[in-house]
Each structure stands twice: as structure tokens, then as C-alpha cells.
Amino acid sequence: MLNCLPGINNRNSGGREVFHVPGRNGQVVDKRSRRRPAHLLNNMKKRNPHRGSSFDDFLKEEGIYEEVTATAAMRVIVDQIRSEMRRRKITEAELARRMATSRSQVHCLLSAEKKSATVETLVRAAGAVGKRLSVELVAT
């Protein structure tokens, strides 16, 4: 084993730069690999209780999983309706006429201000752009 002083590089180790890591058993670490010693990795695992958990787990712990999931699903549906409107060159006023509602109601639906749109409204909007709304349950 090479005798290296803390902070002093030693280039006589087969072309590899090494430096002395003060601490456990006088470890020598390859500067190029930038790997952390195992004892530091073990400490990191103990310090971060969320490491390895999913985003869904985080949302559930915060108590906002259902709200975020509902908002995300609504945004996906609204984006699909908007995309189909662009593809078919349908304006908000035309969509409102096809849905038999006001243009302001359509605007609220498409701007995602109205987070509590009914399934009936979404079905009518999908039908007005020539699509069918499909809702399904999936395993968690």
C-alpha cells in the first residue's frame, strides 16, 4: 500500500491518481472513480427515509394522492380534447354549439379551472370532437 499524505496526489500508482481518505482504516480512493466509501453509503441510506420510495408513496404520505391523481387525469383528458379540436379545426364556440352549452362553460372546461367537471360533461365534449370517453379501473 502506498503512503500518501492527506491532500497530496501520488502519480506512482500505475498512472492512477490516488489520495488518502482520512477516516476508516486509512483507505486509498481512486480520484477518477469518484466512488464514495461503503461506510458513507450506509450512512446515507439511514439518513434519507424516502430513498427508494415512489412518488406515489410520497403523495400518499402527504395526503394529496387522490387530489393530484384526479387533477392529472383531468388534464390528460382536456389536453386530448384540445388536441382533437386543433386537428379538426374546431373553435371553442363550435364545441359549445355541439355540446349545447355556453362558450364560457367550454372555456372553463378547457382551461382546467373547473376541476370538478362531471363525467357527463366530459362525455359530451369527447362526443363533440368525434371521440368516446373511456374510464377504467386498474390494479394498484
Image (cartoon, rainbow, N blue to C red):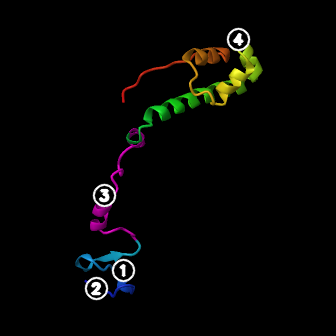
**Tag 2 or tag 3, which sits nearer the N-term?**
2
Residue that mark 3 sits on = 45
Q: CA distance from mark 1 to mark 3?
A: 26 Å
* Residue neighbourhood size for the residue with mark 4, other residues' Cα within 10 Å, grouped as few (<14), some (14–19), many (≥20): few
Identify whether 5 is placed above or below 59. Answer: below
Q: CA distance from mark 1 to mark 2?
A: 9 Å
**Tag 3 or tag 1, which sits nearer the N-term?**
1
Residue that mark 1 sits on = 18
Residue 90 seen anywhere in this rendered image of the structure: no
Which quarter of the figure has residue 106? top right
Residue that mark 4 sits on = 100
**Tag 3 or tag 4, which sits nearer the N-term?**
3
Amino acid type shown at disc 3:
Lys
Do the residues bearing badges 3 and 2 touch, measured as CB atoms within 8 Å?
Answer: no
Identify whether 53 is placed above or below 38. Answer: above
- Could you tell me which quadrant the C terminus lies in? top left
Do the residues bearing badges 1 and 2 touch, measured as CB atoms within 8 Å?
Answer: yes
Helix, strand or loop under label 3: helix
- Looking at the image, residue 75 sits to the left or right of residue 135; the answer is right
Residue that mark 2 sits on = 2
* Residue neighbourhood size for the residue with mark 1, other residues' Cα within 10 Å, grouped as few (<14), some (14–19), many (≥20): many
Q: CA distance from mark 2 to mark 4?
A: 83 Å
**Tag 4 or tag 1, which sits nearer the N-term?**
1
Helix, strand or loop under label 4: loop
Q: Nearer the viewer, residue 114 or 88?
A: 114
**Tag 4 or tag 2, which sits nearer the N-term?**
2
Residue found at x 36% / y 46%:
53
Q: CA distance from mark 4 to mark 3?
A: 58 Å
Do the residues bearing badges 2 and 4 touch, measured as CB atoms within 8 Å?
Answer: no
